[in-house]
Image (cartoon, rainbow, N blue to C red):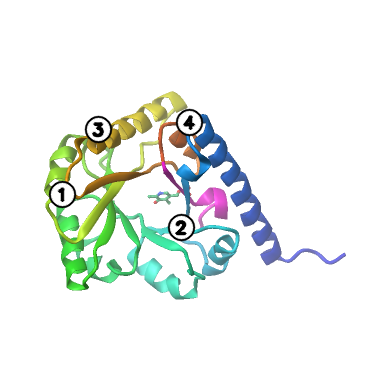
Amino acid sequence: MMEKSYLDKRQEDICYNLDVINEKIAEAAIKSGRAPENVRLMAVTKTVDPMFINMALGHGVTLIGENRVQELLRKKDELHLDGVEKHLIGHLQTNKAGQIVGVADMIQSVDSVKIAKEIAKQSIKRGVSTDVLLEINIGGEESKTGFDKSEFLESVYQISEIEGINVKGIMSVPPICENNTILCKFFENIYNIYVDIKGKKIDNINMQILSMGMSGDYEQAILCGSTLVRIGSAIFGPRIY
Ligand SMILES: *Cc1c(COP(=O)(O)O)cnc(C)c1O
């Protein structure tokens, strides 16, 4: 018998990984008292070759996330993006906003009032309105971007006044934790902020998406209320930089 080619093997792995992940997402959603459709899977495609991304797109993935503007722009024409949403999930520099507005379906990584204003300005210039999530640095880590917990509510009020963007929810990456108990405290913390702001019914702030959970912790994140999990290595294997 002929040996399986490398590409066949990769395709098999990616499809198998997606099946397992989708099943686990559904289980965790049900465990958290929600319908599986309530939790959306994003395939995080940073560093992944378009050929492998297309394998995932051919196996039911409808949402991809990239960290860098340049990488998204470089890869997008090689991708089978019919009916697929693409989100930016990495820090956005002010001078790159003009390149991503109108290209990304959502910018999940709005981490300052300043970048919110720039995205809005670029959106108005192009006659569009851009969907965004606000990123919280829940662990207050120096190494991470995102709003500080303490300044968050004030910033939300400021952002609610800006025309040209639609705030759809919150994104967060908690610190690496020793155990699940500590990790869940962070997830619960983020969820509470999300629910709290939702309850305030602020104009132009629609809390519909809670983006938290990655390859190593998405089940816990769903149990704590996540509605969108961002998964890279568990689908495509370890990243090679
Ligand atoms: C890379 C990345 C992910 C995916 O990480 P994995 O551990 O590979 O699933 C999710 N969210 C953000 C913001 C990322 O940068």
Mark 2 belongs to which amino acid?
Leu
Q: Position of residue 96 (x, y in %)?
A: 25, 67
Q: Which residues are magenta?
A: 227-241
- Which corner quadrant of the image does residue 4 belong to? bottom right
Residue 231, above or below 182: below
Residue 97 location (% of width, % of height): 24, 65
Asked if residue 62 lies left or right of residue 95, the reply is right
Q: Nearer the viewer, mark 2 or mark 1?
A: 1
Question: Of the residues shown, which amino acid type is indicated by label 4?
Answer: Ser
Question: Mark 3 and mark 4: span between their CA atoms?
Answer: 19 Å
Which numbered disc flags the more N-terminal residue, 1 or 3? Answer: 1
Q: Verify CB contact (< 8 Å) between mark 2 and mark 1.
A: no
Residue at image position (37%, 33%) is 187
User: Which numbered dot is residue 63?
Assistant: 2
> In the picture provided, is 111 more to the left or to the right than 5?
left
Q: Are marks 4 and 2 in contact (CB under 8 Å)?
A: no
Q: Which residue is mark 3?
A: 196
Could you tell me the amino acid type at mark 1?
Ser
Mark positioned earlier in the residue sequence (3 or 4): 4
Q: Secondary structure at mark 3?
A: helix
- Residue under the point 13% across and 44% down: 157
Do we see residue 139 in this rendering? Answer: no
Whole-number angstrom distance, CA of label 4 to CA of label 1: 30 Å
Name the residue type under label 3: Asp
| Mark carried by residue 32 | 4
**Mark 1 = which residue?**
160
Q: Position of residue 52 (x, y in %)?
A: 57, 64
Residue toward you, 195 or 185? 195
Q: CA distance from mark 4 to mark 2?
A: 23 Å
